[in-house]
Structures are given as C-alpha cells and as structure tokens.
C-alpha cells in the first residue's frame, strides 16, 4: 500500500501522540503509512507553551514528515486544530476526520471548563491523581495505558483552552473544500452543536459510534478503526458517502 494516502493523527488535551498507538498498529499491520504528532505542551514537547501557531506548526511538521497530502485525523483538542489546519492549508489535506469536537469552543461552556481546570490545578498534585483515576475508570485497560504513556501535562489546560477559544471551527469547515468526516461517540458531551458542524461542511459526513464516549478512538478502538478503514477506502476510490453513516 505504498501509494496509499498517509494518515496523520493529532491528540487531545492532556495526553500525547501515544493515545493513537492502537490505531497506528492497525494501520501499520495493513501497510498504511501513518504518524502521530505531539502538540506543544504535551508528550515530547512538554516544555513548550501551547499556542495556536505552535499547534499548527506541529501538524505541518507531521505533514512534511509523511510527504503529504494526508488524511488528517484529530480528536477533541486535536480535532479543532485539524479543522483549522485544513482550512488554512487545504492542498495538504486529502480528507479531514474531526472526532469528538462538535461543540463551539466559546461562551459559557468554555469559561466553565477553564474555571474547573483552574480549580483542579490548585490541588496538591495539580490534579494528577484525579486525571489518571478517571482515565483508568472510563477507558479500557489498553486505552488508558496508551493515554497515559506519554505523561500527563499538568499545566497545559488554561493555555490550551484559551488558545482554542480563538478558533472558529464552523468557519474553518466552511473554508475547507475536501471531504470531512465528523466522528462522535454516542455518549460524547461534545456533540452539542453536531448538526451545525455538519451543516458547515461543504462535503461532510457524520458517523456516530454506538456505546462510545468522548474519547471515541480509545473507548471503542476497533469500531473507530473500522470507521477509519472505510474512510481510507473511500478516499482511495473517490466514492461518495451518505451524509449520516451508520456504525454497527
């Protein structure tokens, strides 16, 4: 599959590229080129301050490493920056997969999230125990291990959320001319504006994964991999898809 379009994965907040290990393994076993990058303030780039331009530069480095254009896959925080990158550089993105990021990052929900993050940071361990406990309770064992393997960035939340609040994902989706898949877990709290996100896409599809939470690729890794393989097949074949895709 040397001629296959490469896949670039972008992680969520307070995790790292290691959260994509299962998906990288599945694609690697199929001979598909793929890479996961660390955003500023996370994983191998823990010492860097999180900024919009820094996050987009990290994605651009990944695209260059893969030889682009890529199928760009982002989850949660990574989804918002994948949308922004695709809007700015559509020629480098063959298709966009935005997972767990169908809520507009502004207004009172963002303010409340930032206040909660600041309260948690005041804990003696800056929230390390709470974070790791929730990850281990809410995710399967392997998903939790992959999430935590790159370390837990304890001080990135406020800068990351503040930067993300400057993004306009609906505008970004409307600017990107290529195919877009919005992939959400059925129990994802970030589905708040799902239909508005779908309506903003020029060429958008919605996939809802049953019994999956916000961290859909970690909560239901095999189902997510099945969705991703279908997307890659469609990109390779240039096939149209229904607006809403069922997942069994």
Image (cartoon, rainbow, N blue to C red):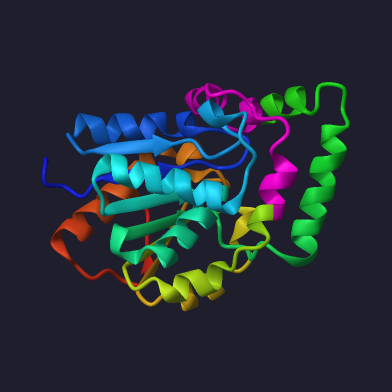
Does residue 153 belong to the magenta stretch? yes
Residue at 71% x, 30% y is 154
Relative placement, left or right, of 70 versus 156 is left
Q: Picture coordinates of residue 152 (x, y %)?
A: 64, 27
Q: Is residue 27 above or below residue 184?
A: above
Foreground residue, 156 or 210?
A: 156
Relative placement, left or right, of 7 versus 207 is left
Relative placement, left or right, of 244 versus 186 is left
Secondary structure mostly seen in magenta is helix
Relative placement, left or right, of 68 versus 155 is left
Residue at 36% x, 52% y is 72
Is there any visible trace of residue 143 in the rendered image?
A: yes
Q: Picture coordinates of residue 236 (x, y %)?
A: 16, 57
Question: Picture quarter containing residue 133?
Answer: top right
Q: Is residue 7 above or below residue 85?
A: above
Question: Picture quarter containing residue 235?
Answer: bottom left
Q: Picture coordinates of residue 106 (x, y %)?
A: 71, 65
Residue at 47% x, 61% y is 83
Image quarter of the N terminus? top left
The magenta segment: 135-162
Foreground residue, 160 or 127?
A: 160
Number of disc labels: 0
Q: Picture coordinates of residue 33 (x, y %)?
A: 23, 38
Does residue 224 belong to the magenta stretch? no
Q: Is residue 49 above or below residue 83?
A: above
Is there any visible trace of residue 226 in the rendered image?
A: no
Foreground residue, 187 or 73?
A: 73
Residue at 80% x, 27% y is 126
């Amino acid at each position: 599959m040397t001629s296959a379009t490469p896949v670039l994965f972008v992680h969520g907040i307070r995790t790292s590229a290691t959260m994509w290990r299962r998906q990288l393994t599945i694609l690697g076993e199929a001979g598909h080129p793929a890479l996961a990058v660390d955003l500023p303030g996370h994983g191998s780039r823990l010492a860097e301050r999180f900024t919009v331009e820094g996050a987009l530069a990290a994605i651009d480095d990944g695209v260059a490493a893969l030889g682009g254009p890529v199928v760009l896959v982002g989850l949660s925080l990574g989804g918002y920056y994948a949308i922004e990158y695709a809007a700015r550089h559509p020629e480098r993105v063959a298709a966009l997969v935005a997972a767990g990021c169908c809520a507009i990052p502004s207004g009172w929900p963002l303010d409340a999230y930032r206040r909660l993050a600041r309260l948690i940071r005041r804990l003696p361990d800056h929230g390390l125990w709470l974070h790791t406990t929730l990850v281990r309770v809410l995710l399967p064992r392997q998903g939790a291990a992959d999430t935590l393997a790159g370390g837990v960035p304890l001080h990135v939340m406020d800068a990351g959320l503040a930067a993300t609040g400057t993004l306009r994902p609906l505008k970004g989706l409307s600017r990107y001319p290529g195919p877009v898949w919005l992939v959400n877990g059925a129990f994802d709290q970030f589905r708040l504006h799902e239909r508005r996100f779908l309506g903003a896409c020029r060429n958008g599809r919605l996939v809802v994964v049953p019994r999956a939470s916000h961290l859909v690729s970690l909560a239901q890794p095999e189902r997510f991999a099945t969705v991703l393989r279908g997307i890659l097949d469609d990109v390779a074949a240039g096939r149209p898809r229904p607006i809403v895709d069922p997942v069994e």
